[in-house]
Amino acid sequence: MNILDFIANKPYKIGIALSGGGIKGLCHAGVLKALEEQGIKPGILSGVSAGAIVGALYADGYTPDEIAKLFEDISFRQMTKFRIPDGGLFRIDAFENFMFRNLRAKTFEELNIPLRIVATNLDKGQSVVFEKGNLIDPIVASCSVPVLFIPKKINGVYYVDGGVLKNFPVSTIRNECDKVIGINASPLVADEYKLSLLNVASRTYHFMFKANIIHDKELCDLLIEPVDMGNYDTFDVDKGREIFELGYKSTKQLLESKMKIIG
């Protein structure tokens, strides 16, 4: 690390990185609520997949409770549409329209909090960070799980889920923040699972993601990783409220324990 990194003031005091994780990403909202209650608010956010969704809504001015409410009555089938395989088994036009209707900001520049969204350039096999211009397209790209969803085309380039190469985007903001809080919604627990297309696919991706988050976990000043999240499947859409509450309660307990140690 360059010595100037210690001398120069970082642009942001606190940054928060939000991992991918499907519906488990709702734990991000619960964690953000617990952090808010302790007066902890980010100067910048970074997100991948589900983390990009929660990050965009939070940066747009939604409260954590409003984010949870927004997804309470939404099922996977309502947000996707089966298609004849041509780059993906499902279309996510309904999800794209949902984000367009609910996000007040349509560009990164309109957000209340700076946001970085990570997606994977399918053409070149590279991790790409979006931070300017159109907001909706990068969110959709970052959520486009390969095979399940058709890749998102942006300026002539196809993009898929950012989690393929970077499921925990701590490094995207690390050098700009004094402190970084990382929220990992996808701790891997090798327990029993249901033998279905969605569950097998999500489990396979979890094994892949496990390898690419190790370095970013080490970059966190505070890592929040609710272990019980491993008991939920990526597409357990009917358990969104449970997941939100788990993120909230586990973070409150973590912060209280750290305060006792300091005190």
Image (tube, rainbow, N blue to C red):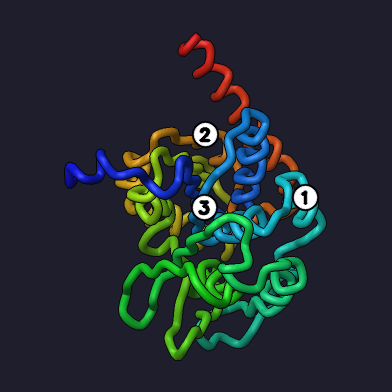
Give the structural element (helix, strand or loop) at label 2: helix
Question: Marks 3 and 2, how far apart in space?
Answer: 22 Å
Name the N-terminal-most of marks 3 and 2: 3
Given residues 86 and 243, the one toward you in this image is 243
Q: Is residue 174 visible?
A: yes
- Determine the residue located farthest toward the bottom in the rendered image: 156
How many residues crowd around disc 3 within 10 Å: few (fewer than 14), some, or many (20 or more)? many
> Measuring 52% from the left and 47% from the top, which residue is drawn there?
43
- The residue singled out by tag 2 in the image is 227
- The residue singled out by tag 3 in the image is 45
Q: Quadrant of residue 111?
A: bottom right
> Measuring 57% from the left and 77% from the top, which residue is drawn there?
134
How many residues crowd around disc 2 within 10 Å: few (fewer than 14), some, or many (20 or more)? some
| Residue 219 screen position, x and y as percent | 33, 41
Given residues 121 and 230, the one toward you in this image is 121
Amino acid type assigned to the residue bearing label 3 in the image: Leu
- The residue singled out by tag 1 in the image is 66
- Determine the residue located farthest toward the left in the rendered image: 2
| Residue 208 screen position, x and y as percent | 37, 56
Q: Is residue 187 visible?
A: no
Q: Is residue 173 left or right of residue 71?
A: left
Question: Marks 1 and 2, how far apart in space?
Answer: 24 Å
Amino acid type assigned to the residue bearing label 2 in the image: Val
Name the N-terminal-most of marks 3 and 1: 3
